[in-house]
Amino acid sequence: QVQLVESGGGLVQAGGSLRLSCAASGSIFGLNAMGWYRQAPGKQRELVAEITSVGRTNYQDSVKGRFTISRDNAKNAVSLQMDSLKPEDTAVYYCHMWIATIGHVWGQGTQVTVSS
């Protein structure tokens, strides 16, 4: 069974930085896209950033230029560097991976709170 373990959330002041990390454990074959989603209270879960198996990236417009997604294929891991954080970035952030032999796999979520 594949599990995603996230780390790196927390409380930070506006303008600060955080780095989220996520690693997959278990037998993994066919790991394709990796990404980060977030869900704020009362809102739907939304895509923040994703990266394909060949390194192509896609960002939500509101985070372009501030967030950077990267992956380590050898470690089955994905990270999200978040700079110039804003209060509106406050949400629970979820790691996501698409594994060809399994489908969608989600992390448990990590809270990011940005104070003004």
Image (tube, rainbow, N blue to C red):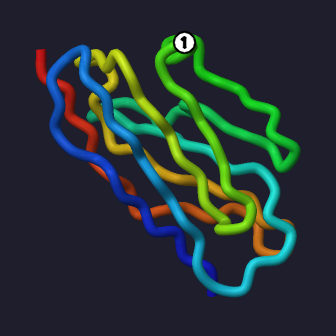
Residue 29 on image: x %, y %: 83, 76
Is 18 left or right of 69, judged from the image as shown? left
Left or right: where 88 falls relative to 28: left
Q: Compare residues 69 and 87 and report the one nearer the observer.
A: 69
Give 103 or 22, whichever is nearer the viewer.
22
Which is more toward the observer, 53 or 88? Answer: 53
At horizontal 58% and vertical 79% (from top left) the residue drawn is 25
Residue depicted at 61% across the width and 60% down the height: 77
Query: Is 2 located above or below residue 50 in the figure?
Result: below
Report whether 90 appears left or right of 48.
left
Kind of residue indicated by mark 1: Gly
Q: Residue at x 50, y 25 (%)?
A: 67
- Pinpoint residue 56: horizontal percent, then vertical percent: 81, 33
- Residue 83 found in image quarter: top left
Q: Residue at x 63, y 65 (%)?
A: 105
Q: x, y (%) of residue 32?
A: 81, 56
Q: Quadrant of the C terminus?
A: top left
Residue 57 found in image quarter? top right
From the image, which quarter does the N terminus lie in? bottom right
Asked if residue 77 is positioned above or below residue 9 in the image, the reply reads below
Image side of residue 13 versus residue 110, left or right: left
- Give percent across and percent down for residue 30: 86, 69
How many marks on residues? 1
Q: Nearer the viewer, residue 41 or 76?
A: 76
When the figure is inspected, residue 38 is found, relative to residue 74, above or below; the finding is above
Classify mark 1: residues with Cα within 10 Å, few (<14), some (14-19) or many (20+). few
Q: Secondary structure at mark 1?
A: loop
Q: Which residue is mark 1?
A: 65
